[in-house]
Amino acid sequence: MPLDALPLAASESNLLAARELMAFTLGFHIVLSCLGVALPAIILIANYLGLKRGDEDAMRLARRWSKAMAVTFAVGAVTGTVLSFEFGLLWPEFMERFGDAFGIAFAIEGLFFFTEAIFLAIYIYGWKRLSGWAHFWSGVPMVITGIGGAFSVVAANSWMNQPQGFTLDAAGKVIDTEPLKVLLNPATGYEVPHMILAAYMVAGFLVASIYAVGMLRGRRDRLHRLGLLIPLTVACIATPIQIFVGDTAAREVADHQPAKFAGFECIQETGPDQTEYLGGICTDDGVKWAIGIPDLDSYLVGFSADTVVTGLEDIPPNERPPANTLLHLSFDLMVGIGTALLALGAWLAFVWWRRRDIPRTPWFLRAVAVSGAAAIVALWCGWIVTEVGRQPWIVQGYMRTSEAVTEAEGIWFAFAAVLLIYAALGTIAILVLRSMSRRWREEGEGDDSDSPYGPSAEASS
């Protein structure tokens, strides 16, 4: 039966509006989430260097980054709250039927989130109120809870891709759940590390890119060099691990979600000797205007040209993912950016091995300056592949997205309102961060020149 003959819970316009609204809010929030997951570790590395080596520049960076994180964390709390409400408002049928299973991970994520917020407050408040090492250790829970929160959210998403751990009644509603099976579903093992590594790449490259821009503008002091080197090193270490995890994830998707894999690789006919296409437009007659590498797709899936890969011809028409060209180009762009960032890390590693210094050419700084934006684009492309590739399912094999969407009117108006609100939030956050950066430059050391663990003015008065 063709897809357009299926009964829908709402009009196509309502479904499109709900999906676009969800995509926009997720795309906005996910960048802030990456900072919440990975920035605490980057801050603590600078903090550790400051304590261990008596490095005032490293300590100053840790203090400034913690203040900046407070801003991004606050904005992320708002956008994350909106996103959580959208599950119930935009997809009520989904939450009605599967909320008992899907909500497990989000309940746990809430505990991690509030715990991280508490220790972030303690860490910032404790700069002049705790001894050096006591203050450092007060920040460690932020790293743990950031990773725990990422695990919880991504486990929920991976459950949507490979659901298990529940029983349905005659009406198709969850009546019994096994929390461990829900959380530790087959997709959790590759989706969670893939996202956590992505968070460290985004945070590392993004922070490093800010200091690279400053160095290109002539600020070549040690503070800027260290501000570039610490997060860049973290991101460059995460990149090759990410490529390995991503390669493993692609094979798992080929095995357990063949429609998604066939969609982003534009595979039409099932069989061995599958060609890997770089770029191009996906059509029913094959990939047009692409660079083809014979047999490579089969090698990537099963390490042999004889590996049989499922094509779209073996997927029922009403279960095939839409927008295969979007899927294919998003996947290629994600992999291409990852490869470029791997080359950037190799460049840094080679020069550091030779001279114990960063590359001195302006081209290196230019590459680092664009790496932050590039990492964000790769992150977005990865989520396009994950979410669009699962369509038409909201819960793979159990519930279609068209069955889950709300029948309420006015979703497009809500989308427009959210666009305005998020534009205001983003603008305010950027202005606040720029104001903090400008004040730090104009005032020189400012209050950072005082001993970070000396008595505060309030305490000594």
Image (tube, rainbow, N blue to C red):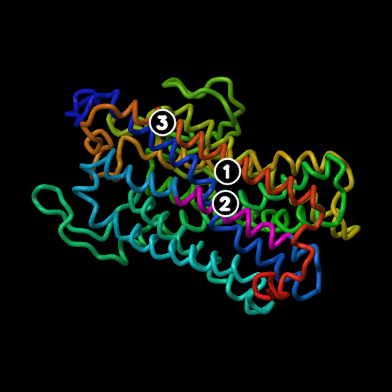
Q: Please identify the quarter of the rendering in which residue 280 is found.
A: top right
Instruction: Mark 3 or mark 2: name the one nearer the start of the chain.
Output: 2
Give residue 269's mark: 3
Residue for point 56% across, 40% down: 428
Up/down of 401 relative to 115, above or below: above
Q: Secondary structure at mark 3?
A: loop
Mark 1 and mark 3 in contact? Answer it, CB < 8 Å: no
Q: Please identify the quarter of the rendering in which residue 79 is found.
A: top left
| Residue 35 can be seen, yes or no | yes
Mark 3 vs mark 2: in front:
2
Circle 1 is placed at which residue position?
429
Is residue 64 on the magenta stretch? yes
- The residue sitting at the front extreme is 461
Mark 1 and mark 2 in contact? Answer it, CB < 8 Å: yes
Instruction: Mark 1 or mark 2: name the one nearer the start of the chain.
Output: 2
Up/down of 327 relative to 194, above or below: above
Instruction: State the residue in front, 401 or 123.
Output: 123
Residue for point 42% across, 49% down: 80
- Main secondary-structure element of the magenta-colored stretch: helix
Residue 297 percent location from the top left of the image:
53, 40
Residue 120 percent location from the top left of the image:
55, 64
Instruction: State the residue in front, 247 or 330.
Output: 330
Circle 2 is placed at which residue position?
71
Up/down of 139 relative to 315, above or below: below
Which amino acid, by three-letter code, is at mark 3? Glu
Up/down of 290 relative to 103, above or below: above
Q: Is residue 403 left or right of residue 125?
A: left
Residue for point 55% across, 69% down: 122
Magenta residue span = 61-77
